[in-house]
Amino acid sequence: MSPKPFSSEFFSALISSETSNRFSLSDYFENAYDRSYDFCESLPYLISSRDVSVTSPFSYEAAGLDAYCLLYTTKGAGTLYCDNTAQVNAAYDLTRGSLAFIDCHADHKLVCRHNIWEYTICFVSSPVTGYYHKKLQTLGGCIFKLGSNADLLSLWDKLLKTQIDDEAHGLMRSRILMDLYTQLYLARSMELSNSYHVPSYIVDMKKSFDTAYDEQYSLDELAQKYDVNKYRLCREFAQYYEDTPLQYLNNVRLEKAKELLLHSDEKVVTIGQMVGIENTNHFIRLFKEKNGVTPLAYRRETPIL
């Protein structure tokens, strides 16, 4: 008896979806691989892969799918809703260069937040995949910015290089998946190791942004407080946290604003003030630039899983 097609398993796990006329979720499975090889019982294996280009509206929510998903964004942005390490539903921005490692057994939702979102999606499986996903979750989550990590980018390209569906190429893809998982683990471990060597003033500044984001800051005042040239201050902060201090602060504020929009009845103008952005128009502009929609639209359209 032949195994049930993975596309059927996917649609059985689908809770809701909204797609435009340009893309059908059935298109995910145009490049599905044979799952009957012996190695599929014990090694990670690629079930299907697809380059995707969607426009808003596009979303789907699923749970109970016996697979994991690797999603790499190449253009535009989307949002992933799923439980974080504390088992609390959270929203993760998927922007250009980000790789999301998603547990499809659990409830998760993908939403296109910009006019266009282009990404590559790979469905993968095996107990080994689950082991690595769990390990990475304990190290801080499964969203990665590949950036200029040549090893990870090379492995990702190799994984997608050939679509030949036979046992030899299937084993080759399994080997690449093992290497990819291991590199993700090593990269995350290195990030944590480096965090112990962050200059104390950088740590203190980040702590202030994380806990007192509603206060007002300026580069000149920060430079004076820590007795560090403001250009050096920006350069060193970005070295450890990828964004400049004020970019990081605004990202914290906007994440807190998203929580307040979903879990309070406060007006938009009040929420902006609560997170430290006094000018309402500026708050709305920053929020839309980051999330693709206005605060009111975000509150109206975002599900609370």
Image (cartoon, grey):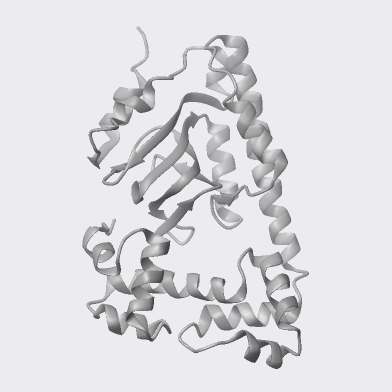
For the residue pair 299 and 216, the one nearer the viewer reads as 216
x and y percentages locating residue 148 in the rendered image: 68, 47
For the residue pair 247 and 303, the one nearer the viewer reads as 247
On-image quarter of the C terminus: bottom left
Image point (29%, 32%), residue name = 23
x and y percentages locating residue 18 in the rendered image: 23, 42
On-image quarter of the N terminus: top left
The quarter of the displayed image where residue 201 is located = bottom right
x and y percentages locating residue 285 in the rendered image: 37, 70
Image point (55%, 71%), residue name = 247
In the image, residue 88 above or below residue 187: below
* Residue 89 shows up from this direction: no
Image point (57%, 26%), residue name = 160
In the image, residue 211 above or below residue 300: below
In the image, residue 200 above or below residue 126: below
x and y percentages locating residue 296 in the rendered image: 24, 68
For the residue pair 256 and 126, the one nearer the viewer reads as 256
Is 262 left, or right, of 289 in this rendering? left
Q: How many numbered markers are drawn?
A: 0
Image point (58%, 50%), residue name = 144
For the residue pair 24 and 284, the one nearer the viewer reads as 284
* Residue 135 shows up from this direction: yes
Is 90 left, or right, of 138 in this rendering? left
